[in-house]
Amino acid sequence: MADDLFNSFMNGPDENGRFGDFGGRFVSETLMPLILELEAQYERAKTDDSFWAEMDFLWKHYVGRPSPLYLAERLTEHLGGAKVYMKRDELNHTGAHKINNVLGQIILARRMGKSRIIAETGAGQHGVATATVCAKFGLKCVVYMGAHDVERQAPNVFRMKLLGAEVVPVTSGRGTLKDAMNDALRDWVTNVRDTFYCIGTVAGPHPYPAMVRDFQSIIGKEVREQMAEAEGRLPDTVIAAIGGGSNAMGLFYPFLDDQEVNIIGVEAGGKGVNDKMEHCASLTGGRPGVLHGNRTYLLQDDDGQILEGFSISAGLDYPGIGPEHSWLHETGRAKYVSITDAEALEAFQLCCEKEGIIPALEPSHALAHVMQIAPDLPQDHVICMNMCGRGDKDIFAVAKHLGFEMDQPG
């Protein structure tokens, strides 16, 4: 049940940007005026018909929404239990769900008179989406990306550069998503006058977690309509992979008050959830703390120092999670599990072989959990998992892990 702060699971955050004990706004004094301006602009945009008219037009004619809801018949037959549907957000322009949110934020940035957009990226999909929309509107784009991710996501780095973005490799820490977000925040503090920070996930200081969720909730809204057409009812279970958790919140949010719908988030279990922290399962193996402007579950040591997570998937390689997910975890409305690299690779291959769909490594984690639970569920049980990204960006990484020799473009 929702706690006393909420009449429903869909009413958060409160006026302080909190989902129960999570969220909030932990930022420097330099950034606070910009954060408050962004919040005011978004509050106005939410009730502005012209804002949503522009969003709807671009979602349809530029992104290609609605994305299909696809019944995976051969996979369903192979698993021998529940009926498996895929929400095909990998068919969006740029190949992932990220552009749903980027469009909204950059339209807000233009309304605020910002001419320079910065972003962080892990797998590169948010960076590609940001570079794409900046190119469309003629805005300067700078993308911070961990040096380790630059190496393992070379195709997306090249795409960003083709689109006119400056890609800044971040060498601090382990050179992954956490470190890229740190450097992006430093840039923002230095260039507050002309710069807008386009955050790619449901994390960061308020209003980002709620704003990104709202833009991504187009996913779940479409699923409700499409499932009514396909099955005449709501799905029994919705499943999505989680790094920071934007694709998952986008799918989950429109179903939060439908208690008959099971909600499952799948974290990156890496080499296994253990004391060595060779994983990125913040809810499974972490505890509450503060990072990147919000309070949420984090991987940290006994002294509160943030630990370096590990995952085969660059997009899930983050030592925290969005604060709304932390709240849903503690209230029990959603269930969170972890999947190892090996299990995700198995799901990646099975999806290719059975459905002719090459998934990204991120949704491969969600699909791996589907593979675990579907065989034991009745055939009239309906699962919908979010196929949030396509796998062309991951083929070199997958080939390496599977022992295939491929020459990666330099």
Image: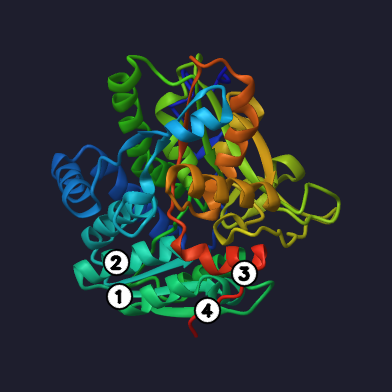
Which residue occupies 33% across, 69% down? 131
Looking at the image, which residue sits at the far bottom? 410
Disc number for residue 132: 2
Residue type highlighted by circle 1:
Leu
Mark 1 and mark 3 lie on one chain; the one further toward the N terminus is 1
Q: Amino acid at mark 3?
A: Phe
Q: Which mark is residue 408?
A: 4
Q: What colour scheme has been applied to the protein in the rendered image?
A: rainbow
Q: Nearer the viewer, residue 215 or 238?
A: 238
For discs 1 and 4, the disc positioned in front in the rendered view: 4
Q: Marks 1 and 3, how far apart in space?
A: 30 Å
Residue 163 numbered tag: 1
Q: Disc 3 marks which residue?
A: 404
How far is disc 2 from disc 1 in space, using C-alphas?
A: 6 Å
Q: Secondary structure at mark 1?
A: loop
3D distance between C-alphas at marks 3 and 4: 12 Å
Residue drawn at the location 58% of the way across and 33% of the way down: 370
Dot 1: few (<14), some (14–19), or many (≥20) neighbours within 10 Å?
A: some
Amino acid at pointer 2: Thr
Q: Where 388 falls versus 278 (above or below)? A: above
Residue 243 visible from this viewpoint: no
- Mark 1 to mark 4: distance in Å? 21 Å
Examine the rendered structure and indicate whether residue 44 appears above or below residue 96.
above
